[in-house]
Image: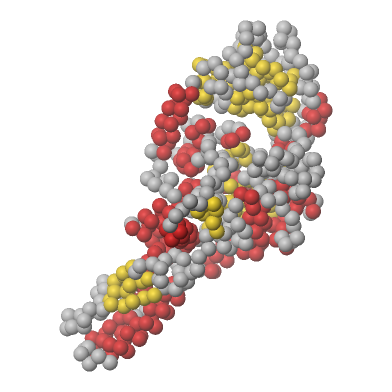
């Protein structure tokens, strides 16, 4: 297993005094031959990616690869180490690891190499250094040209996707009510899935993935996931994916004059959420006793673990993930097959970087940890929050002690590490889980985070068409630009009273030609009616018409207090009352009325 060390080297233009470390006449990788006991195996440039196009000025990320169990030795032998960077044969910076703040400005074609020496200085004249990276070539452009290039690339990528792939939640809900998608109608027809099937799925679960999502604003990310790596065709056997939302909030405008209008908008958002839940049956909101807020992430994670332990107790592992990532669940599930109890894993930077991590005390940072929350000067090793795994015994420990376990607000990953310390379970690195915000794309990844909805779909298309994972990769085309952006306006909890559904029956005046036609108008106290017609000659009452009514109720009144079974019972009761009323009408042909009743009683 490689242990990784990140050293961010930021470069700037340099004067004529700069020198070259690479002699074109010498053998490539002109390095001292390291001792077998050397903890370092290599150094590489990881940003920019080979063949990339970047905007000036550019920063460079280097990665020092440490041999297994070499972290402590590295810290001792390389504490004064220097990383130098050479661009187009010119050394532009030499700095201690992680301490350079330079940037490189010169546009054009560039080739960059990184050099590592443990001595604290680099003898350019003798060209002696410990490690040299392979060369990386890229192109540097000025801002206007680069911005136009990226905008064009984004448009080209998005043109590959289905229309409306970036629809908001409310846009999607409104469209379904006007022109419902055939797949949506089929999903709503299966209103009450068999519990027996659910039990079978739970019994065979290897992995339950809980994807944390912002309920109102990240609908397009959920759709991207549902249609790609969590789709029925892509999901490995024994893996289930659900979305973790908590009680939803929406933004209310503080200067909104018409409070009734604002209230109607908020209710429409709430009903759109309810429709999504009815259609996909994978979004958890009120089922989790938590609030949908970044600053309550730890509570959301705790509530999910409690939910997982009680609803999916036979699952062997649980994964917590964010909704801006692509998961290779085939690779992940294959690796989990070889794990057992007391398992806690993910990207562990304290191990991968071979450095101790300290809490952020800056009150302006959204990741701040006050001394009142966490008094120590060092953080325990922890798996980063966008991707981590727990075995079910660890999940059950959190579930059983959820009322007593303290958390650190938005710092759910550190909170989990502290909870696991009580069990003396320590995080293990899970290789191949990367973040685009602090790295690049690699074809062997099991997960890549910080993606746009479009990038999630592009990666899936690459895999489906048997191309490389990173085919057509452009970092600033794939990278989400709004990570950590605060929401505007005043958040309002979306909590409304659920309403009863009412049915009004209309039949033509019974005549000799009347064949039992019927129209039902469905409504609630606050929503106008939706009409559904029954034609006995074309459909059966129970198998076709009542199912059609149930679909329309779920589509147009998703927040109503009802189930399909409840709808059937309510309609039968009211129809019986209508039959009694019609039977008392001497102008109605008794034979026709009897035939009409028989039609309704058919099963």
Q: Give residue 510's position: percent from left, percent from top.
A: 21, 83
Q: Residue at x 43, y 61 (%)?
A: 260
Quarter of the picture holding the C terminus: bottom left
Pick whichever, 527 or 46, lies toward us: 527
Q: Residue at x 54, y 56 (%)?
A: 492
- Tell me if I can see residue 371 in this picture: yes
Vertical arrangement, residue 100 with respect to residue 276, above or below = above
Pick whichever, 9 or 69, lies toward us: 9
- Tell me if I can see residue 237 in this picture: no
Q: Give residue 151's position: percent from left, percent from top.
A: 43, 31
Q: Give residue 279's position: percent from left, percent from top.
A: 45, 60
Q: Quadrant of residue 548?
A: bottom left
Vertical arrangement, residue 235 with respect to residue 13, above or below = below
Q: Residue at x 42, y 66 (%)?
A: 557
Question: For the image shown, how many numbered marks are present on the structure?
Answer: 0
**Coloration mode:** secondary structure
Q: Give residue 232's position: percent from left, percent from top.
A: 48, 53
Q: Residue at x 20, y 90 (%)?
A: 587
Pick whichever, 541 or 238, lies toward us: 541
């Amino acid at each position: 297993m490689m242990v990784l060390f990140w050293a961010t080297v930021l470069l700037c233009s340099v004067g004529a005094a700069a020198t070259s470390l690479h002699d074109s006449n010498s053998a490539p990788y002109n390095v001292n031959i390291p001792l077998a006991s050397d903890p370092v195996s290599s150094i590489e440039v990881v940003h920019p990616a080979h063949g990339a196009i970047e905007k000036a000025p550019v920063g460079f990320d280097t990665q020092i690869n440490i041999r297994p169990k070499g972290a402590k030795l590295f810290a001792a032998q390389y504490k004064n180490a220097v990383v130098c960077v050479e661009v187009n044969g010119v050394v532009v910076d030499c700095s201690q690891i992680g301490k350079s703040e330079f940037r490189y400005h010169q546009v054009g074609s560039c080739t960059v190499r990184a050099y590592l020496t443990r001595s604290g200085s680099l003898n350019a004249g003798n060209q002696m250094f410990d490690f040299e990276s392979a060369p990386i070539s890229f192109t540097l452009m000025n801002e206007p040209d680069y911005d136009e290039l990226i905008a064009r690339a984004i448009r080209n990528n998005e043109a590959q996707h289905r229309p409306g792939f970036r629809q908001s939640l409310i846009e999607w809900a409104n469209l379904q009510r006007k022109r419902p998608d055939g797949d949506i109608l089929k999903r709503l027809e299966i209103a009450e899935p068999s519990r027996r099937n659910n039990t079978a799925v739970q019994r065979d679960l290897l992995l339950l993935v809980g994807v944390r999502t912002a309920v109102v604003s990240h609908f397009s990310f959920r759709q991207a996931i549902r249609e790609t790596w969590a789709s029925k065709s892509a999901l490995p056997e024994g893996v289930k994916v659900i979305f973790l939302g908590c009680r939803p909030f929406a933004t209310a405008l503080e200067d909104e004059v018409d409070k009734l209008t604002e209230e109607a908008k908020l209710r429409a958002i709430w009903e759109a959420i309810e429709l999504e839940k009815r259609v996909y049956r994978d979004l958890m909101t009120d089922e989790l006793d938590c609030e949908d807020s970044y600053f309550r992430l730890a509570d959301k994670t705790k509530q999910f673990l409690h939910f997982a332990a009680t609803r999916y107790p036979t699952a062997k592992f649980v994964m917590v993930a964010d909704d801006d990532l692509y998961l290779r669940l085939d690779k992940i599930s294959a690796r989990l097959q070889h794990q057992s109890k007391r398992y806690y894993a993910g990207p562990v930077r304290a191990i991968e970087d071979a450095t101790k991590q300290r809490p952020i005390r800056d009150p302006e940072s959204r990741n701040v940890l006050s001394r009142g929350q966490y008094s120590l000067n060092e953080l325990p090793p922890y798996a980063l929050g966008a991707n981590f795994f727990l075995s079910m015994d660890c999940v059950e420990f959190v579930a059983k002690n959820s009322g007593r376990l303290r958390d650190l607000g938005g710092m759910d990953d550190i909170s989990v590490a502290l909870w696991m310390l009580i069990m003396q379970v320590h995080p293990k690195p899970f290789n191949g889980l990367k973040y685009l915000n602090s790295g690049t794309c690699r074809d062997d990844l099991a997960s890549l985070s910080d993606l746009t909805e479009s990038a999630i779909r592009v990666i899936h298309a690459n895999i489906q068409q048997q191309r490389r994972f990173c085919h057509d990769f452009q970092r600033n085309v794939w990278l989400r630009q709004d990570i950590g952006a605060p929401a505007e306006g005043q958040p309002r909890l979306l909590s409304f009273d659920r309403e009863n559904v009412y049915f009004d029956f209309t039949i033509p005046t019974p005549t000799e030609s009347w064949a039992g036609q019927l129209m039902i108008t469905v409504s609630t106290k606050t929503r106008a009616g939706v009409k559904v017609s029954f034609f006995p000659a074309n459909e059966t009452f129970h198998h076709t018409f009542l199912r059609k009514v149930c679909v329309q109720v779920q589509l147009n009144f998703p927040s109503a207090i009802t189930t399909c079974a409840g709808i059937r019972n309510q309609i039968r009761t009211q129809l019986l009352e209508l039959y009694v009323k019609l039977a008392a009408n001497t102008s109605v042909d008794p034979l026709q009325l009897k035939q009409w009743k028989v039609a309704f009683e058919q099963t």
